[in-house]
Image (cartoon, rainbow, N blue to C red):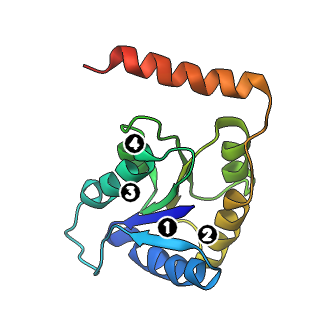
């Protein structure tokens, strides 16, 4: 598995810390930027690259994307076929793992302005080590998302 990372300025420091940590844990990382802190950057420029990579290998690769709230980043990522991005910016720490279990999420969008780097690492670890539940209803629902999406794309 390759873990793709991407961030704008608001999530830059979280991304950098997570990148070092995941590499130390033995993960293969691809950093899609930002590569330097620039308060004028735009998240679609970076998030789209990570989302495209996951879209090409949705059952194998994953991405962790970072922004201020994580919302815009998830919206961008979810525009790509077969990307299932979930957002976490605090609250119930089991939400990212549940997104893996029930929705087979392959992108985790982190709201860096709302959670610490330590909590970010904790939920990422759980997310990366949680498998989708094998129940047919979850597979069926995800399949329906893809089928409907194909019908509405121009």
Mark 4 or mark 1: which comes first in sequence?
4
Can you identify the residue that label 3 sits on? 50
Residue 112: numbered disc: 1
Residues under numbered marks 2 and 1 in contact, where contact means CB atoms less than 8 Å apart? yes
How much space separates mark 2 and mark 3, taking CA atoms? 18 Å
Mark 2 or mark 1: which comes first in sequence?
1
Give the number of the mark in front: 2 or 1: 2
How much space separates mark 4 and mark 2, taking CA atoms? 20 Å
In percent of width and height, residue 10 lies at: 37, 69
Q: Does 14 appear above or below 64?
A: below
Q: Residue at x 52, y 72 (%)?
A: 28
How much space separates mark 4 and mark 1, taking CA atoms? 16 Å
The secondary element bearing badge 4 is classed as helix
Q: Does 22 appear above or below 110?
A: below
Residue 25: image quadrant is: bottom right
Can you identify the residue that label 2 sits on? 120
Can you identify the residue that label 4 sits on? 75
In percent of width and height, residue 85 lies at: 51, 45
Q: Residues within 10 Å of mark 4 (few under 14, many from 20)?
A: some
């Amino acid at each position: 598995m390759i873990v793709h990372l991407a961030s704008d300025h608001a999530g830059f420091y979280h991304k950098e810390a997570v990148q070092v940590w995941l590499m130390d844990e033995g993960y293969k990382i691809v950093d899609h930027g930002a590569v330097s802190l620039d308060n004028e950057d735009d998240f679609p420029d970076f998030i789209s690259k990570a989302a495209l990579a996951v879209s090409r290998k949705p059952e194998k690769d994953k991405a962790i994307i970072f922004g201020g709230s994580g919302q815009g980043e998830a919206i961008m990522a979810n525009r790509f076929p077969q990307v299932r991005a979930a957002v976490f910016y605090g609250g119930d720490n089991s939400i990212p793992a549940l997104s893996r279990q029930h929705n087979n999420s392959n992108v985790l969008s982190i709201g860096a302005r709302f959670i610490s780097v330590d909590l970010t690492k904790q939920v990422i670890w759980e997310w990366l080590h949680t498998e989708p539940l094998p129940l047919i209803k979850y597979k069926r629902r995800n399949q329906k998302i893809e089928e409907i999406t194909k019908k509405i794309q121009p």
